[in-house]
Image (cartoon, coloured by chain):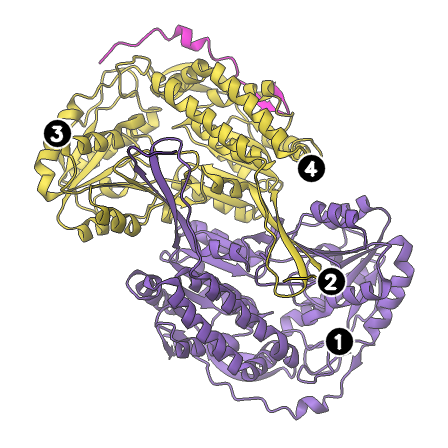
Chain colours: A yellow, B purple
Amino acid sequence: MTGLSNGASALNKVKFTKLFINGEFVDSVSGKTFETIDPRTGDVIARISEGDKEDIDIAVKAARHAFDFGPWPRMSGAARGKILLKWVELIEEHAEELATLDAIDAGKLYHMCKNVEVPSAANTLRYYAGAADKIHGEVLKMSREFHAYTLLEPVGVVGHITPWNFPNTMFYIKVAPSLAAGCTMVIKPAEQTPLSALYNAHLAKLAGIPDGVLNVVTGFGPTAGAALSSHMDVDKVSFTGSTQTGREIMQAAAKSNLKQVSLELGGKSPLIIFDDADVDKAAELALIGILYNKGEVCVASSRVFVQEGIYDEFEKKLVEKAKAWVVGDPFDPKVQQGPQVDKEQFEKVLSYIEHGKREGATLLTGGKTVGNKGYFIEPTIFSDIKDEMIIAQDEIFGPVMALKKFKTIEEAIKSANNTKYGLAAGIVTKNLDTANTVSRSIRAGTIWINCYFAFGDDVPFGGYKMSGFGKDHGLEALHKYLQVKSVVTPLYNSPWL
Amino acid sequence: MAAISNGHEASSFNIPPIKFTKLFINGQFVHSISGKEFETVDPRTEEVMTKIAEGGKEDIDVAVKAARVAFDDGPWPRMPGAERARIMMKWADLIDQNVEEIAALETIDGGKLYHYCKAFEIPAAASTLRYYAGAADKIHGEVLKASRELHAYTLLEPIGVVGHIIPWNFPTTMFLAKVSPALAAGCTMVLKPAEQTPLSALFYAHLSKLAGIPDGVLNVVPGFGPTAGAAISSHMDIDKVSFTGSTEVGREIMRAAANSNLKPVSLELGGKSPLIVFDDADVDKAAELALLGILFNKGEICVAGSRVLVQEGIYDEFEKKLVEKAKAWVVGDPFDPKVQQGPQVDKKQFEKILSYIEHGKREGATLLTGGKSVGNKGYYIEPTIFSNVKEDMIIVQDEIFGPVMALMKFKSIEDAIKSANNTKYGLASGIVTKSLDTANTVSRSIRAGIVWINCYFAFGNDIPYGGYKMSGFGRDFGLEALHKYLQVKSVVTPIYNSPWL
């Protein structure tokens, strides 16, 4: 494993550690702070203000005032778009800082963040900036003499609860459409990764987002997160995270003011590789599918089904490639996989690996930790999987693949759907009919054919079944932050109906 | 006191026998597994009409299994939309052919006006079925605009097995408004009608079979909320629940969904909708609109204009006309064509409304007219109007769901907007004015899902309808409603050498 680079300069990038409410960085009401840890070393990076219910109340009041009386919803969409575009420029100017923050906070690959993720997040913001002045209601087709139309109105004050695996990306995919729609918001980023959210709030202010429109309250789920989901004056909560927390949020919403929720939850996404696939490319795709972002992706292809005709060759190439995979310091451009985000995740993944061994799956490669400092785990592949095994049903959220052989297309579809989740799926085949049949038959929200992780700003993304409901990306996502109002008036002497 | 009809024309009406009283599962009428039954009562007379099979958790399980097989393996989702449409159109024709029998069932089950059901509500519901039948072959995904060499599109797929839980105030309208878009989308379903009004749902189920809806696609399980309803909302194999009813039950359904399989829910809940009458209104017409707004369907309508805000310039004249008209309103047997208001749906609602009227008196509001029950049999209540109300009074904040209006005076347009929005609900609202600017400003400013300008209850098949705030989320009617029963799947493939992007 490669050595750790000098982290001192990285720590200089940590400028913002307090709550961002109503345009100012402020301490939490209680004065409490919490540590954020560098998963490369287990060391404390900084102490961050810990927001709780009282801080959420203040933030929601600011957001409510900004919505009910402030300029943001009253501006034209084009004017909102302009401010968002200014913000995009600032993101691009500060890409290095943002990438550094995610690397030290979450163990993400620095170069990936700087060259791919942060620019993508900026593009997402551009996309919605461009959509802000193109939000259309409809004039309806009446069967009596009435003039009727729908208005797509901003839903109001939104609560965003974002996860730790893609802090910058998640921040922008939630914030961008809700701002474009004219909403105001309170964001509670994951406690593991508060740094880039606070930096982004700072950039928002520089860009000209009015005070109170965007508030960031760092803190924990059971306190700040729960306060947001049960707040009587928040109109909508948008959440990405675990299925268990998703349940709690929906319950809190139901108990409080019946606010709308959208949930993007876990996955156990299947990648199905047919006999006609290019075996080498397929093996590479499968490996990236589970090792990208150290397996901490909700759409990770954690179950790989390979048709029997190519199975042996595939398994051989897969294991070769896995053994050559470079695990180490995420600042090192040669490294392909950084540490897991924190100790809790690290231990959870290792415990699933033990389950796999006990359940009788075959450990083809990996299974152990790397080094004696930080949270690094080897790429791990189990074969001879049965659908009911825990490692085939539970979302592990780490670099652990379950590999299985299949015979027929029907068998593949059946196994693919044998999960409570339904987030994504991949199909590798050259055959048009196979691609069409299987894409219709898998119950999942995104199907990647001969590719994986192919996201796009215009491509809606979200789950089926217990992977949740509601979409991020695309014009679809705007609808989460809009409400439909129907307006109806009688008409007289209209020359047509 | 409101006028009462003498009931002669009603008593000579020939009420048809009740033919369907069992659960409809997998194309058959069957007893409940437990054998239990419950009574359904005629609110005109307080008498038991018949016993209905009472579905419980085990019956819901059987129904969901049937719906699941029908979805996963049956013909319904696999048919083209146009074929689903033909069957739905046939069903609409059968409804038209049986309109009198169904209208009679609604009258004895829910106290609804017979002639209104026959001439308007049931034909309108049949037109809703036809509307969605016509939409079934026009459900479009989109091809997306990729910023890299990818071909990407969305598929709008039927979500699967749907649970519908419908209320007792508009049994026909609710049945068809829920079932039609779900069927058009290709879903299968289990519907639990309100225990107060199971009769028309079972009749519709019978007609659906005659029309050719395949077995298992549409299942109807009468029963109670805490048993059959709860079993639906917490079922691990139902993909979506669509509910119309009280806010309290809406909460329980959302919690049960969260506790079980995180199924998406849509909720259409209560309302305390404001009708705002400006100085430039025609006072006579406005008073009529306001009265209809609270007395239509005996006030048992979620969008009832239960708060009436009148600008001070016309207030006195308005109040005078309103009370005159209220006193002339005819309350009586709903089979009588002269009657404008039938009985409340059951004893519980009847007592709840009377208790709210007592609250109003105790809170110090002025009782302008009404306030008492009518006759000594059945659940009839006089049209009741309170004035001099304060916004924090219970009768101004709570949904009463009966013929009780809270009348208020206002000064400026800003006052009206503020009062209108001073509610946890956000279902509907009405504005009466000739001024274009007033209409535009106020319609943008009221936080409610429907704004009626110079009209009220103006529904249409193409108009989406649903709440803001604690009136719920999700829309019925319009193409919007289809989205409740569809899921968006994105399909993405790399492309090579495309001449454009």
Residue contact at pointers 4 and 3, CB within 8 angstroms: no
In the figure, is residue B28 to the left or right of B412? left
Q: Quadrant of the N terminus of chain B?
A: bottom right
Q: Count residues near mark 2 (Cα–Cα under 10 Å), then give few for <14, some for 14-19, many for 20+.
A: few
Residue A36, horizontal then vertical, whole percent: 43, 19
Residue at (55, 22) in percent of width and height: A87
Residue closest to the eye, B147 or A214: B147
Which residues are the magenta region? A1-25
**Chain that bears disc 3:** A
Identify the residue position indicated by label 1 in the image.
B373
Residue contact at pointers 1 and 3, CB within 8 angstroms: no
Asked whether residue B266 appears in the rendered view, the answer is yes
SS class of the residue under badge 3? helix
- The answer to whether residue A497 is above or below residue A71 is below
Does label 4 or label 3 sit earlier along the sequence?
A: 4
SS class of the residue under badge 2? loop
**Amino acid, disc 2:** Tyr
Q: Are dots 3 and 2 on a single chain?
A: yes
Identify the residue position indicated by label 2 in the image.
A492
Residue contact at pointers 4 and 2, CB within 8 angstroms: no
Q: Count residues near mark 3 (Cα–Cα under 10 Å), then give few for <14, some for 14-19, many for 20+.
A: some
Measured in 3D between alpha carbons, the distance from the residue under mark 4 to the one under mark 3, in whole angstroms, is 60 Å
**Amino acid, disc 4:** Asp
Measured in 3D between alpha carbons, the distance from the residue under mark 3 to the one under mark 2, in whole angstroms, is 74 Å
**Amino acid, disc 3:** Lys
Residue at (41, 10) in percent of width and height: A10
Q: Main secondary structure of the magenta part?
A: loop
Identify the residue position indicated by label 3 in the image.
A317
**Chain that bears disc 1:** B
Measured in 3D between alpha carbons, the distance from the residue under mark 1 to the one under mark 4, in whole angstroms, is 43 Å
Q: Nearer the viewer, mark 1 or mark 2?
A: 2
Residue closest to the eye, B60 or A308: A308
